[in-house]
Image (cartoon, helix red, strand yellow):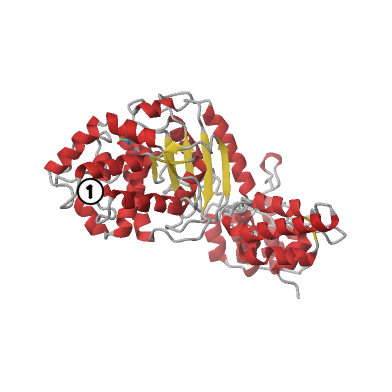
């Protein structure tokens, strides 16, 4: 009996029953998977081993697999591989989607607004031209373009991660004894507390510094840093995480404001009892100095999009409620003083940092990491903001975009033809059954009632052939469909009604066609 391995093999093999390895790999790539994906490790290892053994025996590097070898090579990872071949990932037409991302990347590249941050001297060294975009979906589909392998400091992008880790360790009630939920409406490093004498939220300096004191409270600083950076690494699917010591030193050297803030927080008893404030501040600077690349950053974002499970390792790192709370506050407070406008325009949780990074999350779909150092007056990456706006202008990712009826925007979660195919099926079944309620629903939802299936059959053809007089009247009178449409055999609905001896329908159609003759400029388009 054929199983999934056989079916994949049959769909790809040549007439001699051999499958070129490159063809197999390129199909996986087209679905968005990388050869380095940990979930494909066994398959890639088996393929390499096979190629090596053939090379040793025959002196040639075999590039073709027979059926048996293919089965042996892919067996360990067949679930993921079959998902890729069945187009069952969250973004089914991944290549088309990447093409749009490419277009956006190049469009935004010409944006030369903004200034590279200079208040931490080491940050001023980033080139203003760096521009990278990386995407990782909740199924681990990857795409990157531009400067995506250069390490950059997380800076404030560490704040939502600190918050998520605090929530993962303590209850939300406990965490929010120390920090509020509201946007501050102030600069990120302002010396200001809310009416309860707490920092306004975890996404500004005051909040993040206090939350640093909640992470692994009993341990020494070295262990706390190890724990946190290990968690970051796990969120990033073990991809690039490093520490930039010179940024850390440079920041500590020049951070008068953060020192002032820390003393102010201590004065107002914002820290848990026993907190070593200077150590906590060091910890905060260290977390700001953790580096990611756009690539690894996109995996972190994808872990947040995926409820705390890293898509490329399958490991649960954070509990889903910690992630949900983190995304909520990223949504309302993540983009400094621009957060309200950003929530309005883009409608997605995100967090920016003074290094020029933007971590954007499309919940249940994908994580995106953008990097371009020049910042606007709010401290957000100019290119990053433009990219987010353009993205949501193209795709219905805004939290309040309507997924059913938004016509202008694309939904990359659907296959190109799924939407139309679903509509046609719905419509033609309603016509076949003479189901006026269902037809009315289609009509009211704005569906084109002249839609045809692959044979050019309209709802009117089907209803006429079945003799559903009421449906025919509804389609003609209410929906104003054209009775002159021809299917692929050149038959009109009237021809069908005659063929199947539906005399009542014949009368209705003839009468309607004579009183509403076909007009040149009125002819419906298929
Ligand atoms: N380390 C920076 C600071 O505390 C982080 C600020 C930021 O990215 N906005 O000033």
| Residue 233 visible at all | yes
Q: Position of residue 345 (x, y in %)?
A: 41, 39
| 481 vs 12, nearest the viewer | 12
Most foreground residue, 71 or 233:
233
Q: Which residue is mark 1?
A: 180
Q: Nearer the viewer, residue 18 or 336?
A: 18
Q: Position of residue 24 (x, y in %)?
A: 73, 55
Q: Residue 445: horizontal and vertical position, in percent?
A: 52, 54
Q: Residue at x 57, y 61 (%)?
A: 439
Q: On the rendered structure, is 164 left or right of 173?
A: right
State the quadrant of the N terminus.
bottom right
Q: Is mark 1 within 8 Å of ligand 1?
A: no
Q: Is residue 85 visible?
A: no
Count neighbours of disc 1 (C-alpha within 10 A) and say few if under 14, some if 14 to 19, many if 20 or more. many
Quarter of the figure with residue 427: bottom right
| Residue at far bottom of view | 1
Report the front residue among 473 and 393: 393
Q: Give the image quarter of residue 258.
A: top left
Left or right of residue 501: residue 164: left
Q: Which structural element holds mark 1?
A: loop
């Amino acid at each position: 009996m054929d199983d999934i391995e056989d079916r994949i093999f049959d769909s790809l093999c040549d007439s001699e029953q051999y499958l070129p390895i490159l063809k197999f790999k390129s199909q996986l790539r087209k679905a968005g998977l990388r050869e380095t994906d940990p979930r494909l490790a066994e398959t890639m290892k088996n393929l390499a081993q096979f190629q090596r053994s053939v090379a040793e025996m025959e002196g040639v590097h075999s590039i073709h697999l027979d059926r048996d070898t293919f089965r042996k090579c892919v067996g360990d990872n067949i679930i993921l591989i079959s998902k890729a071949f069945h187009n069952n990932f969250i973004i089914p037409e991944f290549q088309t989607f990447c093409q749009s991302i490419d277009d956006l990347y190049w469009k935004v590249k010409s944006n030369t607004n903004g200034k590279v941050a200079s208040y931490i001297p080491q940050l001023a060294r980033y080139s203003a031209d760096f521009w990278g975009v990386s995407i990782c979906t909740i199924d681990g589909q990857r795409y990157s373009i531009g400067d995506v392998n250069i390490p950059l400091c997380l800076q404030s992008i560490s704040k939502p991660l600190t918050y998520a880790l605090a929530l993962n360790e303590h209850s939300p009630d406990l965490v929010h004894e120390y920090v509020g939920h509201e946007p501050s409406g102030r600069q990120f490093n302002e010396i200001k507390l809310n009416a309860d004498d707490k920092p306004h939220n975890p996404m500004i300096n005051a909040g993040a510094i206090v939350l640093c004191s909640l992470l692994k409270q009993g341990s020494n600083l070295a262990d706390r840093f190890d724990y946190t950076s290990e968690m970051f690494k796990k969120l990033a699917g073990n991809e690039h995480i490093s520490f930039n010591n010179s940024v850390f030193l440079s920041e500590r050297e020049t951070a008068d404001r953060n020192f002032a803030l820390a003393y102010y927080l201590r004065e107002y008893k914002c820290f848990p009892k026993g907190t070593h404030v200077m150590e906590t501040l060091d910890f905060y600077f260290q977390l700001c100095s953790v580096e990611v690349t756009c690539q690894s950053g996109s995996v972190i974002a994808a872990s947040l999009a995926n409820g705390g499970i890293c898509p490329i390792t399958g490991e649960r790192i954070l509990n889903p409620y910690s992630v949900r709370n983190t995304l909520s506050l990223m949504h309302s407070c993540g983009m400094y003083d621009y957060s309200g406008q950003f929530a309005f325009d883009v409608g997605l949780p995100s967090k920016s940092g003074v290094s020029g990074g933007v971590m954007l999350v499309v919940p249940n779909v994908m994580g995106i990491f953008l990097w371009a150092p020049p910042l606007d007056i709010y401290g957000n990456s100019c290119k990053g903001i433009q990219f987010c706006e353009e993205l949501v202008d193209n795709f219905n990712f805004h939290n309040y975009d309507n997924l059913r009826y938004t016509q202008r925007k694309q939904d990359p979660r659907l296959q190109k033809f799924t939407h139309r195919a679903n509509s046609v099926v719905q419509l033609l079944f309603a016509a076949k059954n003479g189901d006026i309620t269902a037809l009315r629903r289609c009509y009211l939802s704005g569906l084109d009632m002249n839609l045809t299936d692959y044979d050019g059959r309209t709802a009117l053809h089907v209803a006429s052939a079945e003799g559903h007089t009421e449906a025919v009247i509804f389609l003609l009178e209410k929906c104003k469909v054209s009775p002159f449409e021809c299917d692929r055999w050149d038959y009109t609905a009237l021809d069908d009604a005659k063929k199947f001896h539906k005399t009542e329908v014949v009368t209705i159609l003839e009468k309607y066609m004579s009183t509403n003759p076909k007009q040149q400029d009125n002819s419906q388009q298929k």
